[in-house]
Image: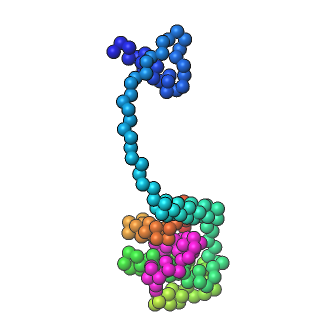
């Protein structure tokens, strides 16, 4: 046991790749038991290809989102985007079971921004009469831009202080396959 500090010092020096100090005798290396031979696991080419494809797609999706930050100009939406925005807002507002007056006013206010000359209340009533399910709305989302538009619409429609709305937004971001960075960026912009 009296030799323990010298042995520890020698092990540290060896691990760091340093020679023994001048005048020191190198400590004998401890005897290591032979390592048991492990069998090599089977190599599955198909599994590797699938995993590689998933990693590549996720990397490309994230790279695309970071290279092209999402900017939403409500005054420059075409008819299809405006309709998608409206139906996404209605679906988000109704996610908690009802469309309350504050959510209704938020949607109407956003519609006034999209089309300042149009009748927001009439457009809202028409959209409510033909409201779409969340699955139907998500079926119209074919790219990151449309996904970000739907998520931004949901953010503008709901009160994020309510737990049910926070859970809905998390669910929606997952269904839209938005990166955490893009979802966080949208949440900061559309409070």
Q: Is 36 located above or below residue 56 in the figure? A: above
Q: Within the image, what quadrant is residue 133 found in?
A: bottom left
Q: Is 43 located above or below residue 120 in the figure? A: above
Tell whether position 140 is magenta. yes
Tell me what residue is drawn at x 35 percent, y 12 percent: 2
**x and y percent of residue 33 in the render?**
36, 30
**What sort of colour scheme is used for the picture?**
rainbow
**x and y percent of residue 4 in the render?**
38, 17
User: Which is nearer the eye, 134 or 38?
Assistant: 38
**x and y percent of residue 128 in the render?**
46, 87
User: Which is nearer the eye, 7 or 40?
Assistant: 40
- Judged left or right of residue 53, residue 78 is right
Viewport quadrant of the N terminus: top left
User: Which is nearer the eye, 107 or 179?
Assistant: 179
Q: Is 103 located above or below residue 57 in the figure? A: below
Which SS does the magenta portion mostly show? helix
**Can the viewer see residue 119?**
yes
Tell me what residue is drawn at x 54 percent, y 77 percent: 141
**Can the viewer see residue 156?**
no
Tell me what residue is drawn at x 54 percent, y 25 percent: 17
**x and y percent of residue 163 in the render?**
38, 66
Q: Is 106 located above or below residue 51 in the figure? A: below
The magenta segment is: 131-159
Tell me what residue is drawn at x 59 percent, y 63 percent: 60
Marks counted in the figure total 0
Tell whether position 149 is magenta. yes
- Judged left or right of residue 189, residue 38 is left
Residue furthest out toward the left: 1
Q: Within the image, what quadrant is residue 70 found in?
A: bottom right
């Amino acid at each position: 046991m009296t030799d323990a500090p010298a042995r520890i010092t020698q092990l540290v020096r060896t691990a760091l790749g340093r020679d023994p100090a001048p005048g020191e005798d190198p400590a004998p290396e401890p005897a290591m038991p032979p390592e048991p031979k492990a069998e090599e696991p089977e190599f599955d080419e198909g599994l590797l290809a699938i995993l590689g494809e998933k990693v590549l797609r996720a990397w490309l999706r994230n790279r695309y989102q970071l290279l092209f930050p999402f900017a939403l100009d409500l005054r420059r939406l075409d008819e299809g985007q405006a309709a998608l925005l409206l139906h996404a807002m209605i679906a988000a507002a109704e996610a908690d079971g009802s469309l309350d007056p504050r959510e209704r006013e938020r949607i109407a206010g956003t519609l006034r921004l999209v089309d300042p000359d149009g009748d927001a209340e009439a457009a809202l009533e028409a959209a409510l009469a033909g409201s779409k399910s969340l699955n139907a709305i998500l079926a119209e989302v074919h790219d990151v831009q449309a996904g970000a538009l739907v998520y931004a619409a949901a953010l503008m429609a709901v009160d994020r202080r309510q737990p049910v709305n926070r859970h809905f937004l998390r669910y929606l971001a997952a269904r839209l396959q938005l990166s955490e960075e893009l979802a966080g960026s949208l949440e900061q912009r559309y409070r």
